[in-house]
Amino acid sequence: MKFQVAVVLSVLMTVVVLGDEAPVVATLEGRISGVLEKSTNNKVFYSYYSIPFAMPPLGSLRLKDPVPAKPWEGVLNGSVLPEMCLQVPFVDTVAGVKLPPRDLAGSEDCLFLNVFTPKDAAELPIIVYIHGGGYFSGGAREYLPHVLLNHDIVLVVLQYRLGTLGFLSTEDSVIPGNFGLKDQTLALQWVQKNIHNFGGDKSKVTIMGQSAGAASVHYHILSPKSSGLFARAIMHSGTALSSWALTRTHRAQAMYVAENLGCPTLEGSEALLKCLQAADAPALAALAQDFFKWFILPMTLSPRVDGDFVPDEPGLLLREGRYTKVDLLAGAVSQEGAMFTHAMLANEDLVSALESNFRTNGPLSLQCHTESNDPAGMALQVYQYYLGQGKLNPLAQSEQLTQMFSDRLVKVDLEQLMLQQARQSINTTTFRYLLTHRAQLSFADFNTQIGLH
């Protein structure tokens, strides 16, 4: 999950310091300038920030598949970090703060990527990084290159639409959804067309992501639309099998959004789309908060099976071998669920919600509210398996709670993926890891009694 650790990438929010100018690079769309920077080991590399790979998804392009960026004249300034896609900030969401539209972060005009390349690079392998954040938060500025660029690689960090702007759907061809995933695929296509100009070898692309970014990586493995755009994959703390990585209630969410924005709900999807495209962007994006019922669960603005980009249920595609066979490294941290345990310790309302209405909130807390004819019974069995039948006590049961959330939200589905991957992908190599080291650079700094992350 996004809250554990940005495993390899430095998350130091370093301000870009202009040194000597980097060479101007010519892409198919136009020329871009960059800046010279140094890695943590003092190795010189060039940074090219805020490269547009798609047209701004505004107006008539809102809630539509991405369109490739148009060529530009002159030299584009590549020294400024891109705005994140419009979102409710992760920190505020975790803290339980509901923000008004005016306080949201980022911009709707956000389909940019950053490229980092060593000085004198030639035919180097490429890592394309996809950020996490539950499909509702995150951005490229959280993942800077100063650690990875100690090595001879080209790093690309992309952005994609989030929340209601990235994953809302009427479950038809008018608003099909999965726009965030399609943004990522367009960025991967851009890499294939342009990365040689930055010293990269397009045949050596590894896609890597964490949490929702990892689930996205898995979706690209499963999707025929992304086939041929990468050679290897790395997945940290998430899969397309994860309970939070697939939603089956998109139309209901679209109707809720429509009602709250004064858009028609009985005149068909075309009329609804026209209204949503004219709506205030922050007001539309802010409604993502309304779908969280217990902490940050359920995560309902996520990918869907659309019969096109995601042609079938991820588990079925995996079992039947209908996916791109690539070398895969995947794993998790030892205590994935630490943030949820910490939230229960910090917010008594979460515990009270479980005690007063377990039938509703128990399934929500385990993201199993749509997976069974008796979700409350299923949730009760899980809680009792890990915690016993006594009164809920997060402080005394912190280790058990962390294990429960870890298994449910990440590890069980990861286990299923790795077993199927090893069986199906005979001509490729599958690696699995478990990270137990407590690093100095972590996304969160919870008490050591709660977990390593």
Image (spheres, helix red, strand yellow):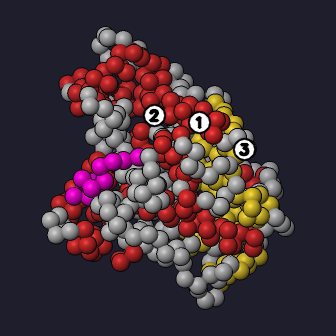
**What kind of residue is marked 1?**
Gln
**Residue 378 in picture, x, y percent from top left:** 32, 25
Secondary-structure class at tag 2 = helix
Identify which residue is drawn at 65% across, 61% down. 228
Of circles 2 and 1, the one toward us is 1
The residue lying toward the viewer, choosing from 353 and 91, is 353
Give percent across and percent down for residue 107.
43, 67
Assign a secondary structure to mark 1. Answer: helix
On the image, the x and y values in percent for residue 53 come to: 56, 72
Q: CA distance from mark 1 to mark 3?
A: 13 Å
Q: Please tell me which of labels 3 and 2 falls first in the chain.
A: 2
- Height in image: 109 above or below 428? below
Label 1: which residue? 420
Q: Which residue is mark 2?
A: 409
Tell me which residue sits at (21%, 62%) in the image. 258
User: Mark 3 — residue?
Assistant: 428
Count residues near mark 3 (Cα–Cα under 10 Å), then give few for <14, some for 14-19, many for 20+: few
Kind of residue at disc 2 = Leu
Relative to 423, is 313 above or below? Answer: below
Local packing at callout 2 (Cα closer than 10 Å; few below 14, some 14-19, many 20+) is many
Along the viewing direction, whichever of 308 and 56 lies nearer the viewer = 308
Q: Which residues are magenta?
A: 246-255
Q: Main secondary structure of the magenta part?
A: helix
- Quadrant of the image containing the C terminus: top right
Residue visible at 31% across and 21% down in the picture: 380
Q: Position of residue 175 (x, y in %)?
A: 33, 66
Amino acid on which the number 3 mark rests in the picture: Thr
Q: Nearer the viewer, residue 105 or 412?
A: 412
Circles 3 and 2: CB atoms closer than 8 Å:
no
